[in-house]
Amino acid sequence: MIEIAPSILSADFAKLGEQINAVKAGGANILHFDVMDGRFVPNITIGLPVLTSIRKATDMVIDTHLMIVEPGKYAAEFARAGADMVSIHIEADPNIHRTLTSIRDNGAKAGVVINPATSLSTLDEVLQHCDFVLVMSVNPGFGGQVFIPEVLEKVRRLKDMIVRGGFEVKIEIDGGVDKTNIGRIAEAGADIAVAGSAVFGNEDPAAAVRSLIESGTKWV
Ligand code: DX5
Ligand code: ZN
């Protein structure tokens, strides 16, 4: 069954604790935390102080997606601050093996993120060193963008690479996920789907999570 990871990027930050409790009540176990630096992507969001506060407020799995340049300088700090999963963009890090190791050494699952235009072949040498791959289904930077359908085929090919290689690697997908595509995403082989506006854009985020889980289950 596919897991839904609500992205707090689309939450109401004045009611963050309440909204986190709502998505948990709706059946989500993973909370997606988007960090943007205004350099790797043209937007600035949240960082370590917010993560530290959320860590104290919830036992949900915190999945930190670093959309920053030089992620090797910060990834371990996010793990130490309580993130359970930390992912870094392969496009941003020439020493990705070292960064993945630093995340794992600090007790978190290590993930590699690939943008829509980045080939799966870039993963050939890293699949054995990561716990999950985050496949972007929009160009990162903003919530509320339209899902790029070609990514479904990419997820299928990645699933095949993982199975053939015998790796213990999960597939996560991020961007434009909603009720109309979650079934096809699950069918393609994704284990986790991030959803921002489809959850927090709804006036009842708990019901939105329930409905996504239900729509994603019909296909598998
Ligand atoms: C986009 C972020 C996403 C974003 C998804 O760059 O990485 O996690 O919050 O938002 P939606 O689901 O609205 O596309
Ligand atoms: Zn994200």
Image (cartoon, rainbow, N blue to C red):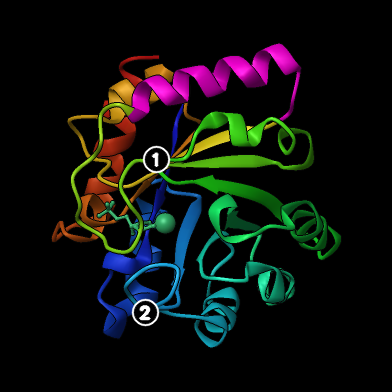
Above or below, comparing residue 103 to residue 27 in the picture: below
Residue 166 in picture, x, y percent from top left: 76, 17
For the record, the magenta segment spans: 151-168
Above or below, comparing residue 149 to residue 23 in the picture: above
Kind of element beneath mark 1: loop
**Residue occupying the point 25% across, 29% down:** 149
Residue 59 in picture, x, y percent from top left: 59, 64
> Most extreme residue toward the left, as rendered?
203
Residue 117: image tag: 1
Does the stretch in magenta take in 159? yes
Kind of element beneath mark 2: loop
Residue 30: image tag: none
Main secondary-structure element of the magenta-colored stretch: helix
Q: Amino acid at mark 1?
A: Ala
The quadrant in which the C terminus is found is top left
Q: Nearer the viewer, residue 214 or 115?
A: 115
Residue 13 in picture, x, y percent from top left: 30, 80
Residue 25: image quadrant is bottom left
Q: Is residue 12 left or right of residue 118?
A: left
Q: Nearer the viewer, residue 144 or 200?
A: 144
Circle 2 sits on which residue?
44
Q: Is residue 94 left or right of residue 197?
A: right
Residue 53: image quadrant is bottom right
Q: Nearer the viewer, residue 73 or 173?
A: 73
Ligand 2 position by quadrant: bottom left
